[in-house]
Amino acid sequence: MVRSSVLILPCLLGLIATFLPTGLLAQVTGVVRDAGSNAPIEGALVSVQATGVRVLTASDGSYLIPGIAGEVVIVAAVPGAYHASQTVLAPATAVDLSVEMVPIESDPAYVWLGPDDCGTCHPDQYAEWNGSPMQKAGLNTWVYDIYDGSGTPGGLGGFVYERDSVFAASNPHSECAACHQPEPWVEQSPIPLQPLDVVTDGMAHGVSCEVCHKLAAVDASKINFPGIVPESTTFIRPSGGAQVEFGVLGDSNFEFPGLMRPAFNPQLVAEVCGTCHQDKNDPDEDGDFEEANGVISEPTYLEWVVSPYGDINSPLYQSCVDCHMPPSGADQVSVFLFPPLLRDPATIRSHEVRGTTPQFLENAVTLEIATAVVGNELVASVSITNDQTGHHVPTGVTIRNMILVVEATRVDDGALLLHTGTETVHALGGVGSPSQGYYAGLPGKLFGKVNIAASGQSPTFFTDAVSIVFDNRIPALETDTTSYPFLLPSGGGTLEVTARLIYRRSWRALTDAKGWTTDGHGNPLADVQGPYFGHLMEEKASSIVLPFTTPEFRRGDANGDAAVDLADAVSVLEYLFIDGDAPLCFEAADGNDDAILDLADPIRVLMYLFGGTPLSAPGALACGPDAAGSFSSCAYSGCP
């Protein structure tokens, strides 16, 4: 009987295996522990290498990966720890993994790996980074112009930190190098930007491979601290020939002494970006950049955090990497592995890291325009919706701005319609000729974040800001709507309203003061190039056809009160010389009927009033048309 039981048991087990779902057997289980304490780790990421199959460990450190069979590499990743891996033949149990925490150290004797060293195994990533804004950050001429005026021939114009800042004496170095030259900054901070006359490796490398991949952790509660500083970041410079490179895939197990040992930092998708794309000033100089008295200069990270795009539980969630490091199309991270470790191309990101390129600027917002005739005006409603960007537009340093310019014309003769509204471009849009990109006072709106110094200077560089005058930038998924009324022209015709949204890298006055013709990386500067004098982000037009009409008016009645008197001459003089209101009907104000509104017109009205000189048809006493139709706008209210 015992012998029969022994024979029957294997048969029963075989039958059970036959009828059980395959997934219950094709699995890998185990526990992830801390190599130092042997304590189980909850929330560790456990992956089947290069497959996208991954799970998190339970509170007891255990994990179960279902539905896999054959030879696989199981990798455990814990933030701040080296990866741990085992190659197993699935199904398998008790695949326990012990992760070793990366020692928190910053060895001053550590020798940086050069980007070309990294490029030996990662040639695609090196080629993408080389020549990018990240690589060029250390030699950005605009940064030098703002810091000490040495970046361009006109750099000493406008604000120069070393010369003009109230903190130049107490904090002569500032924190520019913490983001723009982080390699030398990490070695010895605080230090100033290094002089441009001798370009060192630390300057030429800008934000290098090691700068990002040596960051073990970022304290998001101190994200307003500027750049890579010990108060808010944990930066590793290993000692004794050890090595570490932090990444986000969490499933690499390749190690090479002195060059590569993979570790995990999921913050590389956003918080690491925030170290230099979010900061505040420190007006009381107590070293606390999170105090309420500070003014935020780089706002992008927190703008993202408070938007739906920054909510990992939102269906709209997108990280900085998702947008600014799109898939490169490659299917392997390292060419050094044999056989090649092929991956889903969607998981391999470009290291070019672009932002305000034409592609981004032209796919940031949606502009819409609607027109309607309301009384004697053509009213245009312009809406700008930030529906394609995960932060405010514009964002970045406080000199970035956008300008909406709205123009109404009669298509038949190109005549401009008179704008009667109050929504006009701020003086920071540039005071001068619109033909040269000085848009202040035109129908439209300037979008930006404008600060002010204790001296009253506005705008000022962020280091000296004490408050914000206004911030009308458009948050993610919000809409800005403005309205622009224009006088209907004499004679009707086809009327068209055009709205253009233009991006500028700097306030026009600052650009002029420093004589900038290229951006900080040497590219031609659109801000000073026609026809838009900035990068055209969006353009929309709306047209309407009005039947031909001939307005009636009284010659000389400039203020439209149905009487020609001294007040009419005064109103024209005010318009011409002291920025008074424009006449509603230029034909009525054109006292001498020469199709030009100038000093001769109020003089002609005075000659009529006090000398008896008659006015041209239709005259001052009766309503009638002007056969010439000299002006495009006439909204006269002094006739029945």
Image (cartoon, rainbow, N blue to C red):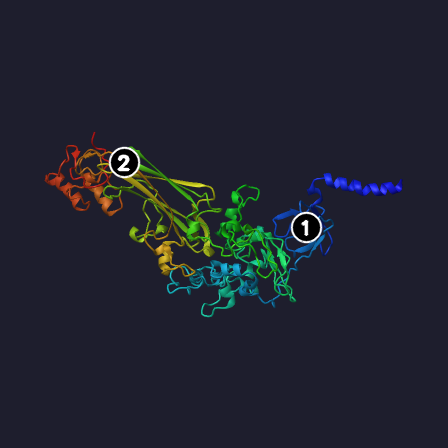
Res. 114 image quadrant: bottom right
> Is residue 147 at least partly visible in the picture?
yes
- For the N terminus, the image quarter is top right
Residue in view at x 18 percent, y 45 percent: 596
User: In the figure, residue 263 lies in which quadrant?
Assistant: bottom right
> Which quadrant of the figure contains the C terminus?
top left
| Dot in front, 1 or 2 | 1
Pick whichever of labels 1 and 2 is earlier in the sequence.
1
The answer, for residue 63, to whether it is visible in the render is no
Q: Secondary structure at mark 2?
A: strand
Residue 113 in picture, x, y percent from top left: 57, 65
Residue at the far right: name it: 1
Residue 527 percent location from the top left of the image: 36, 54
Q: Which mark is residue 545?
A: 2
Residue drawn 33% across the image and 49% down it: 440
The residue carrying mark 1 is 70
Which residue type carries mark 1? Answer: Gly
| Local crowd size for mark 2, using a 10 Å CA cut-off: few (<14), some (14–19), many (≥20) | few
Residue name at image x 57 percent, y 42 percent: 313
Give the percent coordinates (x, y) of residue 559. Answer: 22, 37
> Where on the picture, by quarter, is residue 610?
top left
What kind of residue is marked 2?
A: Val
